[in-house]
Image: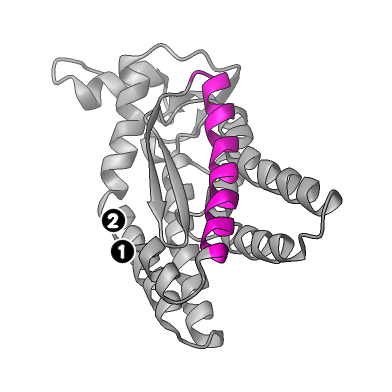
Amino acid sequence: MAAFIAVVTGHFKGFILFSIIILVHEFGHVLMGILFGWKIDKIIILPFGALTVFQEDLNRRIFEEFLIVIMGPIFQIVFTWILCEFGDFNRVFDYSMAILCFNLLPIYPLDGSKLLNLLLNKIVSFKRSHALIIINSFLIILVLIMIKSFDLLFVLIILFLILKLFQEVCDHENLFNRFLLERFLKNYHFKKNKVIHSLDMSKMKRDYNHLFYNGKRYISEQKKKKKRFDFKGKV
């Protein structure tokens, strides 16, 4: 459909250029994901970009995910530099930088939000980080609506982003339960340890083993997860 509209409106060359840049960008994500052994679920082509969906654990190392996310923009930048270095491709540069700047906005599910989420995961809990990303995304969208002149493409993009955000809001608790269930079912070996001075599992972070302290005794993370997911388990 997008290709047909591009032909009708006389923007077919721009559409081809846009598509090539997007494919190079996504190839960066895919290649790094393959190197780390991540399973690729699907690649979704959108009217304004693409989205690579990995079928992977939420508890994979933050550093791995960071490299996978950042490799998309890096591939795009290198590709753009090569074209501009060996030819007169000013139009490529304009297209590529516009796509890159948009993609690095901290709005879910753009790469900018993923990078911000990884940074937040180093600072706060997994659950709080996800909530902050949702709130931040809505705020940035609100700012864009206030400062940007409206056109059809802009409206479609905003509607898509808002839809994705509402899906994340609805999936917030399920995502956290999946985060915990993965840690209950699989043996992750994290190098860092963290003591939580309460029994609140929502304070658990990525890349950490946890020990809970209730004011009287220490309780292991595994016992807390067993109580949550196995009714026979007792703390």
**Residue at screen point 44% across, 64% down:** 135
Q: Looking at the picture, tell me which residue is in the foreground, 79 or 117.
A: 79
Q: Which residues are magenta?
A: 13-37
| Above or below 27: residue 25 | below
**Residue at screen point 56% across, 86% down:** 147
Give me the disc on residue 167: 2
- The amino acid on which the numbered mark 1 sits, given as a three-letter code, is Leu
Q: Looking at the picture, tell me which residue is in the foreground, 133 or 104.
A: 104
* Disc 2 secondary structure class: helix
Predominant SS of the magenta segment? helix
| Above or below 197: residue 155 | below
Q: Report x, y in % for residue 53.
A: 40, 39
- The amino acid on which the numbered mark 2 sits, given as a three-letter code, is Gln
What residue is pinned by disc 1? 163
Q: Is residue 123 visible in the rendered structure shown here?
A: no
| Above or below 140: residue 152 | below
Is 211 displayed left or right of 176 in the figure?
A: right
Q: Report x, y in % for residue 146.
A: 51, 86
Q: CA distance from mark 1 to mark 2?
A: 6 Å
Q: Is residue 36 magenta?
A: yes
Is 131 displayed left or right of 25 in the figure?
A: left
**Residue at screen point 57% across, 31% down:** 62
Q: Looking at the picture, tell me which residue is in the foreground, 208 or 69.
A: 69
**Quadrant (top left/top right/bottom left/bottom right) for the C terminus:** top left
Mark 1 Cα-neighbour bin, 10 Å: few <14, some 14–19, many ≥20: few
Q: Report x, y in % for residue 115.
A: 59, 47
Identify the image quadrant of residue 178. top left
**Quadrant (top left/top right/bottom left/bottom right) for the N terminus:** bottom left
Mark 2 Cα-neighbour bin, 10 Å: few <14, some 14–19, many ≥20: few
Is 177 displayed left or right of 94 in the figure?
A: left
Q: Is residue 101 visible in the rendered structure shown here?
A: yes
Label 2 near label 1: C-beta < 8 Å?
yes
